[in-house]
Structures are given as C-alpha cells and as structure tokens.
Image (tube, rainbow, N blue to C red):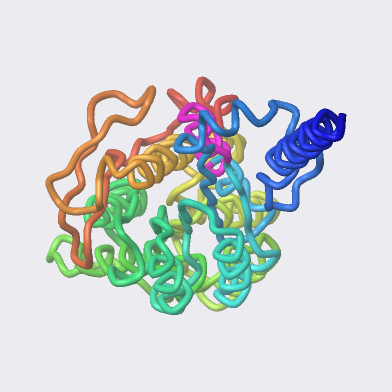
Amino acid sequence: MKKHWFLQLVAVFLLALLVACGGDDETGGDDTGSDNSSNDNGTEESTDSGDEEQKRHAFVFKNTGNPYGEKQMEGFETAINETGGEAILRAPDQPTVEGQIQIIEELIAQQVDSISVAANDYDGLQPVLTKAMNQGIKVLSADSAVNGDSRMVHINQADPEAIGRTLVQAVTEMMENEGQFAILSATSQASNQNLWIEWMETELENEEYADVELVEVAYGDDLRDKSVSETEALLQSYPELKAIVAPTTVGIAAASKVITDKGLQGEVLVTGLGLPSEMAEYISNGVSPWMYLWNPIDVGYLTGYAANALAEEEITGEAGESFEAGDLEGSFEVTESDDGTEILLGEPFQFDPDNIDEWKDVY
C-alpha cells in the first residue's frame, strides 16, 4: 500500500515538472519586449524556424519631411517585405550628423541585421558605423555616401561624373553658352552633392565654356524655407544671373517657386535634379526647360535587396560580386569606386515638356 502511494506521488511530481518546463518554452522564448500577441504561433513553429528568424533591416534617411527621402524609403520597405524581412525606417528631424548618430546608436542596441544610411556627413558617421559593423551588423550607404571605411558597399544612383557633366551641359545650353549661373546645393557636407559639384567644375574647365561664369555655390540644407531664402539672396546678389542649377529635389522646387512667384519666367532658368510630381508645374510654365533624376523608389528598392544580400551572405561588398534585385532588370555588380565599392542603379533620366505628364503621377 505504501509503495502504491509512493508511485502515485512520484507520478504527480513528474507531471508537474513537465508542465513547468512546457510553460517556460511558451513564455521564455521571446526576450524582445514585444507583447503576448507575438507568441500566437506557438512554440513548435518558433523551434522549427529558429535559423529562419525574420531579419530586420533599417534605413536612415537625412531628415523627415523630405519627399525624395520618403520615396526612397518606400522602395526600401517594398524590397525588404519581398525578401521576408522587417523594414525599420528612421530619420532625424533636421539633416544633422548628430541626429543620425543617435538613431544609429539606437539601432545598434536593437541588434538589427543591417543599417543603410543616406548620410548627412561623409566622415562624421565613421565611429558609430564602425561600431555597428564590429557587432556584426551589415552597413551600407545609399544616395549620399559615407567613406569607404564606414561601410561595406555604397548604392549609387548613377555615375557621379555623368551627373556633374550633364548638369553643366544642360545649363550652358539653356544659357546659350554665355552668362552667370549659380548652384543651389543641399548641405555643405553632403558627399554626393559635393562630388557632383566637383565634376561640374571640372566640366567648366573646357574652353567651350569660356564665357560662362559660376558665381556661387549656395547651400539650402535640403530645407524648403532655407532654400527659398538662398534663392532670393542669389537673385539679389547677382542681378545678371541667368540660371540656377540645384542638384537637390528640395532646392530645385524651392528655386523654381521663387522665380515663378517673382514673375521671372524666361529670365532666370532652373535645372538640376527634381521630382516630376513637384516640378511638372515649373516645366510647364518654362521656368525649368528640363531637369533630371532617377527613380528614388528604385534607389531604395535596390538598397533593400543589397542589404538582404549582405545579411544572407550572398555578397560581402567585394568588387566583382553580383546579385539580382527583385523587379529591377538584370543583375547588379559590385564595382570599385574612388573610395571602397559601389553598386550603380543607372544613368540620369531627362524630364521635359514631352514626357513630364506621364511621370508626374508616378513620383
């Protein structure tokens, strides 16, 4: 009789132990701080998919409220969703390196799988991005680069030389190769803007531009109000100004609006890099005879696929590697750049009165 009760006691003890262990499996497997709804799939699925955990990819743009950046992040999110990952989209309120550093520190603490950044400063992000890479996070720059030691690869919209030379050729054709023009850039630390301007200045050294004068490079910091103020200052400082080149979507729209509001259509021309949706009015009214850009959605989309390829170890960022990027045609090759490696999206595209209507509702 005592033996019978002893065996029953042992059985009850073992059953309680099994129940306790099962409870730990259900509630202890998620230490991310998410709510209970994240466990609805049960423990069996979590155990089976341990090596296939959803990867988290972050994109850090220059600042909030930038239509170009919003389209770029839209493309990035689409790509990450297609690859089965989670997209985290962040940007500081102002286009400062300090704001981006704070965000990246937070992303490192979250142990995301990749960080892609459109940088506000070429060198200023190196310490925090190096910290990220040292912790196993894949780091890319996109659109506006960081230096080669701060990234694994850079996603470039188009060849910087082609952009710079094309903008000079465009504005001088509009000016009939004679007169003064100014550049309205983003921030003075923006690596992509600075490289394009360097190539513009190189192109201007050709003898055919002997009667063309670049009078000033102004900086609107990719802020609408400041870009408006800088445009007004240029018009006041240079009464003979014939054109403004703005290699920034915020700047070109701001400059075009100022010139339209002042009734200077045909007197001061504008070209550069703009969003068709924002520039359609100014191409139609003649303030901007034509301008250029690539699809910012595609820039973000390519960045998302590159981030996934790095996280999945399909590429390492070394020259000669290649990968496919969803709906974008062909394969994309990692190539050498002046500082590290890069992946090129394509050539700049011209928007003019003949095609602006078909693009203005796209982006």
Q: Is residue 157 magenta?
A: no
Q: Is residue 136 above or below residue 353?
A: below
Residue 35 appears left or right of 172: right
- Which of 141/236 is in front? 141
Stretch in magenta: 72-86
Image location of residue 316, percent across then percent down:
25, 51
Q: Is residue 85 magenta?
A: yes
Q: Residue at x 63, y 66 (%)?
A: 106
Residue 362 appears left or right of 160: right
Residue 200 appears left or right of 108: left
- Residue sitting at the far front: 1
Q: Quadrant of the C terminus?
A: top right
Image location of residue 273, percent across then percent down:
44, 49
- Which of 129/334 is in front? 129
Could you say which quadrant of the image residue 330 lies in? top left
- Which of 21/245 is in front? 21
Q: Residue at x 44, y 60 (%)?
A: 242
Q: Residue at x 58, y 70 (%)?
A: 105
Q: Is residue 304 above or below residue 241?
A: above
- Which of 60/136 is in front? 136
